[in-house]
Amino acid sequence: MNAKAFQDFYPDDVSHCYGCGKLNQHGLQIKSHWDGEESVAIFEPKPYHIAIPGYVYGGLIASLIDCHGTGTAAAAAYKAENREMDTLPAFRFVTASLHVDYLAPTPLGIPLEIRGKIKEIKGRKMIVSVQVMANKKICAQGEVIALPMPEKMKSMLSPSQPEKKPDKV
Amino acid sequence: MNAKAFQDFYPDDVSHCYGCGKLNQHGLQIKSHWDGEESVAIFEPKPYHIAIPGYVYGGLIASLIDCHGTGTAAAAAYKAENREMDTLPAFRFVTASLHVDYLAPTPLGIPLEIRGKIKEIKGRKMIVSVQVMANKKICAQGEVIALPMPEKMKSMLSPSQPEKKPDKV
């Protein structure tokens, strides 16, 4: 496992995401790494991420699957080009669709293990399968269809935000 | 539109959800109402609910769809029994699965309109179709498969939480 997470390699101007941006002080700041062919992130929900007492709310689980999925897609894109994540051009993926099956209530108060696997690569599109586990039990099974951030979207980056590394997006 | 939202009728012991619980001070506290045959909620994301500068992150959109979907399912269950939401027994739905198609980037800094519609009722299962709109443009299209909270789940409610109205759950 590398010390730096996938998300630590995102260029600063696309590192604001509430779910995974290293620059979002209010956010979840999830950190994903390779573990063999799978990607893994460990995240411990806060007490207020509650659904019913004792259990995690589904929206957080969806967020973890989403951001871990796009992170895994980006990391896999470097892998496919046999490049390290600190090389240019940088990859950043967005979510085209997200699906989550909630299989069992997810207990609150323990770290969750989020595991991703590339299910399919179709041209630029990556389909990432993601499981959320608590105490090694699968509580949710998700799928993220991720696409490289479109050029149009990059050009929409708010001009009020400093774009420190526009050549890297 | 009634003054009280669907979520305001949830019994206290199932009103902790980060997305929609009236008792979660850290949460989103979404509020859904009928608007004819559709349900509607208005929610303005906070500046930190960012994806890339100027746009809302997908996990929040998934959360809004999820909680508005289960709220709509509960309200529809009362409607199907021709009952007001302040009558017993109380309905509370959980999410079996959630699907979101992200159709366009969702602008940050304006109120979002979340619209739900019952697509199908199959026994106890409700399929709710939900759209998230910004400036009347559909940014995300979602579907929630909602089920009444299972008896087993009700019995799991943490004993450390006061269950003020166990007969209403």
Image (cartoon, coloured by chain):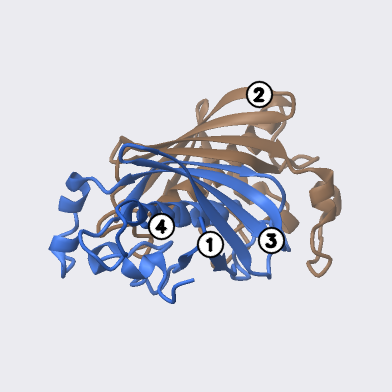
Chain colours: A blue, B brown
Q: Secondary structure at mark 4?
A: helix
Whether discs 2 and 3 lie on one chain: the answer is no
Asked if both marks, 2 and 1, belong to the same chain, the answer given is: no
Task: Note whether A75 is above or below B10 in the view shown.
Answer: below
Q: Whole-percent x and y of residue B94?
A: 67, 44
Badge 1 element? strand
Residue drawn where x is 72% and y is 57% of the image: B12
Task: Kindly report the distance in space between the C-alpha atoms of the residues bearing marks 4 and 2.
Answer: 36 Å
Residue under pointer 1? A40
Q: Is residue A5 left or right of residue B2?
A: left
Of B165 and B117, the residue lying toward us = B117
- Indicate which disc residue A134 carries: 3
Q: Residue furthest front?
A: A82
Q: Are marks 4 and 1 on the same chain?
A: yes
Q: Which residue is mark 4?
A: A71
- Separation (CA) of disc 4 from disc 1: 10 Å
Describe the element under mark 2 as helix, strand or loop.
strand
Give the amino acid at mark 4: Gly
Instruction: Label 3, secondary structure: give it.
Output: strand
Q: Read off the residue under disc 2.
A: B121
Amino acid at the residue labelled 1: Val
Mark-to-mark CA distance, 4 and 3: 21 Å
Q: Are marks 4 and 2 in contact (CB under 8 Å)?
A: no
Q: Chain of mark 2?
A: B
Chain bearing mark 4:
A
Position in image of residue A122 (x %, y %): 36, 36
